[in-house]
Amino acid sequence: MEFRNSMFYEDINGNKYGVITVAQLERSIKQDKFNDWDEVTQDFIDSIVKVDSDPNVTEYFTKFGRFVLDSIAHIPDAKAVYHSGNGCAYVYVPNDVFVIGELVVNAREVFDSTTGAHTQTDYTYKVESPFICNKRFCPYNSRTEYRTVASKRYEKAVSNARKYLRPNTLADIVRCTFRDLATEFGKIVDNQRDKVNKLCKTMGAGKVLYGRTDLADEIPILAEMMRMQDQGVKFLDPVLADNLSKYREEIALLVEVGAQDEMYACFIRDNNRGETVVDYHDVKVQSPYSALDTPTLDPYNTKFLTDGSYNIPVEKLDEDLSNKMASLSIVDNGEFVRGVGYKYTENIYYVTK
C-alpha cells in the first residue's frame, strides 16, 4: 500500500518529509477490500498466536504486538493500525492532522556456521517519524533512514518510540501548511491583480500592475479620475463611473491581500477530556523566513511557536477571534475571506490580526 503525499512536514533544518494525513489513512482503512488493515490490540495479537502453528510467526507477532502497544501507551487515544502488505504499524491520533509515525520489527534468523542449524532470531525495532533527524544519514539521499531510529535492545526501542511519537502540535501543523498557504496567497494576489488589470484596460489606463501592493496613485490618470469623483464630478459615461468604483474596491483588496502577512494560526482539536479547544499563535504567512531574529516566529528555531495560547476552550476565546473563526467555519476549505482570514481545513484556520 502506497500513499500519495499531499502534505509535507518541514523540519527545523528546512528538510521536507512527506507525511500521511489522518484523513488519507482512515479513508484507506474504510475502503479496505482485501482485509489488509487491522488495529493493533492485544486481542489482534492473541488471535494470530492462537491460529498460526508456526512458532517463528507466533514469536514474531508476540514481540511485534508488545512493541507497538508499549510504544503508544503514553499517548491518550493513540491508535496503531497494521497493514499486512507493508508489514508495519501506522500510529496516529484520530483528531490529529497527520500520522505521527510508523513502527517496524525486522527479524533475522541466525544459523550455526558449522552445522547450518538455526540458533536464534535477532530482532531490530524501528521507529520512523517526521520528528526524527538521524544525522548519520543524508536527508536527500536516504530520506527514510534520516527519519528512522533503530535498536536491537527492546527497552531502548520503546524509549525511542516514546521520545519521537507524539500528537501533532500547532507548530507541527504550521510547518506542514505555511508554504501551501504562502502559495495560495500568491494565487489570490495574482487573481486579484488580473481583475485590477482588466479594469485598467477597460478604462484605457493601459498600465499593467506587477507588484503585490501596487497603489492607485501609481497610475496618474486613474488617481486624477478618482479625485474628480471624490469632488463630486459626474462622468457622462455611467459605465466608466461604475468601473472606477469597482477599481477602488479591487485595488484596495489587492493591497490588503498582498500586504497580509501577520495572522493567527489556529488549530481546533479535542483534548484528552473530550473538550473542544483551540491552540493559536501569531505567524508570518507570506514571509516566514523574514522573522529569523524572532525565535518564536523562526521555523529554524526550537522555540518556534512556543509563545502562543494553547488549550483554550472555545467559549473562552477572544471575542474577535471567535467571531472570525465562526465566519470561516461556514465557507469552503481553501477560501479567503477579506478582513477575516483563510480556511485551510475544517480544523486549521489562519485568522487576520
Image (tube, rainbow, N blue to C red):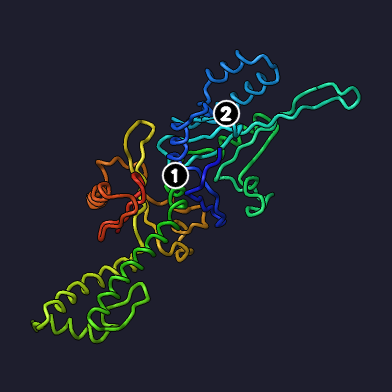
In the rendered structure, which amino acid carries the disc numbered 2? Answer: Val
Which x, y percent locates residue 59? 67, 20
On residue 33, the disc is none
Q: CA distance from mark 1 to mark 2?
A: 22 Å
Q: Which x, y percent locates residue 257?
A: 31, 66
- The part of the image, by quadrant, that contains residue 150 is top right
Closer-to-camera residue (53/288): 53
Where is residue 68 drawn, in percent x and y? 57, 28
Residue to which mark 2 is pinned? 68
Observer-nearest residue: 213 or 313? 213
Q: Is residue 42 left or right of residue 226?
A: right
The x and y percentages for residue 94 are 42, 34
Query: Among all residues in the image, which is located at the extreme right?
Result: 114
Instruction: Please give left or right for residue 210 compared with residue 9 in the image.
Output: left
Quadrant (top left, top right, bottom left, bottom right) of the N terminus: top right
Element type where label 1 sits in the image: loop
Q: Secondary structure at mark 2?
A: helix
Q: Above or below — where is 286 with respect to 323? A: below
Res 180 → quadrant: bottom left
Is 49 located above or below residue 105 in the figure? above
Please indicate whether residue 174 sits to the left or right of residue 205 in the image: right
Taking the view exactly as shown, the residue that stands out farthest to the front is 33
Sequence-wise first label, 1 or 2: 2
**Residue at the disc numbered 1:** 169
- Circle 1: residue type: Thr
**Which class describes the residues within 10 Å of circle 1: few (<14), some (14-19), or many (20+)?**
some
- Residue at screen point 62% across, 33% down: 104
The answer to whether one can see residue 279 in this image is no
Residue found 14% across the figure and 76% down from its top: 239
Camera-side mark, 1 or 2: 2
Residue sitting nearer the eye, 84 or 217: 84
Which residue occupies 65% across, 45% down?
145
